[in-house]
Amino acid sequence: MTDVQQAVRERYGAIAASVRSAASNSGCCGPSACGCGDPITSNLYSDAETSGLPPDAVAASLGCGNPTALVALEPGQTVLDLGSGGGIDVLLSARRVGPTGKVYGLDMTDEMLALARDNQRQAGATNVEFLRGTIEAIPLPDNAVDVIISNCVINLSSDKDAVLREAFRVLRPGGRFAVSDVVVRGDVPSDIRRSMELWVGCIAGALQDTEYTDKLRSAGFIDVEVEPWRVYQIDDARTWLTDMSIDVDRMAPLVEGKFASAFIRARKPEAKSCCGPDCCR
Ligand SMILES: C[S@@+](CC[C@H](N)C(=O)[O-])C[C@H]1O[C@@H](n2cnc3c(N)ncnc32)[C@H](O)[C@@H]1O
């Protein structure tokens, strides 16, 4: 386990434990207090989506978008959520793929898996399975899923190429990648990049939008789109930088408008069809 993985596990393990013990939610994707007013995690889902979900699945929502709103899910499909946390996007997907479909949630943090399984039981979702493992080495066979979703997790990885390679491997030909993530637009100060606390809060590890596109194409994906939808402004930056050993007044203007939550979409090409005795060789 890398230092980043260890720090991420400790951070999100503590959040899961606090949600499970009904204590106040003390941190999230975004280093400030979570929930109301948090610039990254707040106001991501409609009331219609969250109604009927277990309250702890909603309370543990730590994403930066709504990946299930990005993609058409059909009954009978298989979906994989990379870094499924308390399970909110898994449970939303499970409703849409129905009893003939299947949704896997993958997470490396035991406390999050325990919370997600409690939420699954409360929701009565029988078409769901939470897997323990890392997104850099997905514990599923090749060509196993129709759709990959993820919500504010890939930025946390210190080996994003491995994550995208693995995502490509487990997707079926023609399968879709529909992810919400934080991206960077332009250069950001090195103090920000070096902060482990900002890394585990989904800020320091974010890829540039152009890098994301390049990495997805290098992994083999086509039809790649990175679409920022919530660009963070100076007051949001102040929220992240407060309480850290970072000079807020110097740094906030340098990160104004540089970070955004984005929808990231891509597709694995269809398998080549054979057209004659020689053309598939
Ligand atoms: C910011 S939270 C997002 C959780 C969930 N996607 C949501 O929207 O609420 C990040 C989650 O990803 C998990 N995670 C982070 N890095 C991971 C990795 N390399 N492999 C597996 N899980 C990881 C953490 O344990 C945590 O549950």
Image: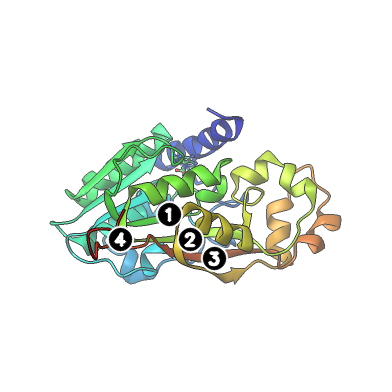
Query: In the drawing, does residue 15 fall left or right of residue 238?
Result: left
The structure residue drawn at horizontal position 73% and vertical position 51%, both measured from the top left corner, is 241
Query: In the drawing, does residue 276 fall left or right of residue 7?
Result: left
List x then y, in percent, for residue 14: 50, 36
Q: CA distance from mark 2 to mark 1?
A: 6 Å
The structure residue drawn at horizontal position 81% and vertical position 63%, both measured from the top left corner, is 253
Within-10-Å neighbours for mark 2: few <14, some 14–19, many 20+: many
Q: Which residue is mark 4?
A: 279
Amino acid type for the residue under numbered disc 4: Cys
Query: In the drawing, does residue 238 fall left or right of residue 14?
Result: right
Within-10-Å neighbours for mark 3: few <14, some 14–19, many 20+: many
The structure residue drawn at horizontal position 50% and vertical position 46%, both measured from the top left corner, is 25
- Asked if marks 2 and 4 touch (Cβ < 8 Å), the reply is no
- Asked if marks 2 and 3 touch (Cβ < 8 Å), the reply is yes
Residue 235, quarter of picture:
bottom right
Amino acid type for the residue under numbered disc 2: Ser
Q: Nearer the viewer, mark 3 or mark 4?
A: 4
List x then y, in percent, for residue 255: 75, 61
Q: Is residue 174 above or below residue 8?
A: below
Q: Which mark is residue 180?
A: 2
Q: Is residue 260 above or below residue 152?
A: below
Q: CA distance from mark 2 to mark 4?
A: 38 Å
Q: Which residue is mark 1?
A: 150
Which secondary structure lies at badge 4?
loop
Q: Earlier in the sequence, mark 1 or mark 3?
A: 1
Amino acid type for the residue under numbered disc 1: Ser
List x then y, in percent, for residue 176: 36, 62
Q: Which residue is mark 3?
A: 262
Q: Earlier in the sequence, mark 3 or mark 4?
A: 3
